[in-house]
Image: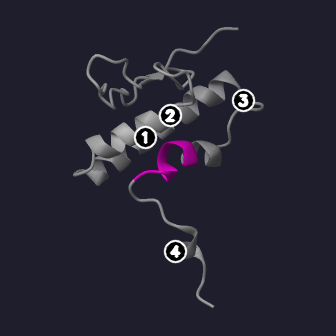
Amino acid sequence: MNIPVPRLGPYPDRPRPYPPDHPAHLPIRPLWLCRACGGPWPCAQARLLLKVEYADHPVDLAVYLSGLYHEATHDLFRLNPQDGPTPRELFERFVGWGPYRRSITDTMPAS
């Protein structure tokens, strides 16, 4: 099996390692697994570190995550088009937890 070469979209360079002498929780592309813990990226630690790093810049975090969602969708679909994650699953994984998520009560009509 040939692994496709990632496109030249946004470069996943965040979150920065914390503490600085520990491995960074960055993705291995095109698999989108965490380099530090091996879980699906963004892993819980990456999410926490991203929220802290972008605490004063939520729009920047949303744009960053949206760009990586786009790249991951492309990469993961090319790796496994038959039974890979759905676009909705990837949206929840990359963007849905971010700064502009809406709770279910925000989307339900008032009774």
Q: Amino acid at mark 4?
A: Asp
Q: Nearer the viewer, mark 4 or mark 1?
A: 1
Q: Secondary structure at mark 2?
A: loop
Write down the region rendered in magenta. 92-98
Counting from the top left corner in percent of width and height, residue 95 is at 48, 48
Q: Earlier in the sequence, mark 3 or mark 2?
A: 2
Badges 4 and 1: C-beta atoms under 8 Å apart? Answer: no
Q: CA distance from mark 3 to mark 2?
A: 23 Å
Main SS category, magenta section: helix
Q: CA distance from mark 4 to mark 1?
A: 23 Å
Q: CA distance from mark 3 to mark 1?
A: 26 Å
Q: Nearer the viewer, mark 3 or mark 2?
A: 2
Q: Which residue is mark 1?
A: 47
Q: Secondary structure at mark 1?
A: helix
Badges 1 and 2: C-beta atoms under 8 Å apart? Answer: yes
Q: Earlier in the sequence, mark 4 or mark 1?
A: 1
- In which image quadrant can residue 86 be found? top right
The residue under the point 37% across, 31% down is: 10
Q: Is residue 38 above or below residue 98?
A: above
Left or right? Give the position of 13 relative to 43: left
Instruction: State the mark number for residue 106.
Output: 4
| Mark 4 Cα-neighbour bin, 10 Å: few <14, some 14–19, many ≥20 | few
Q: Which residue is mark 3?
A: 81
Q: Is residue 59 above or below residue 67?
A: below
The residue under the point 38% across, 55% down is: 99
Q: Amino acid at mark 2?
A: Cys
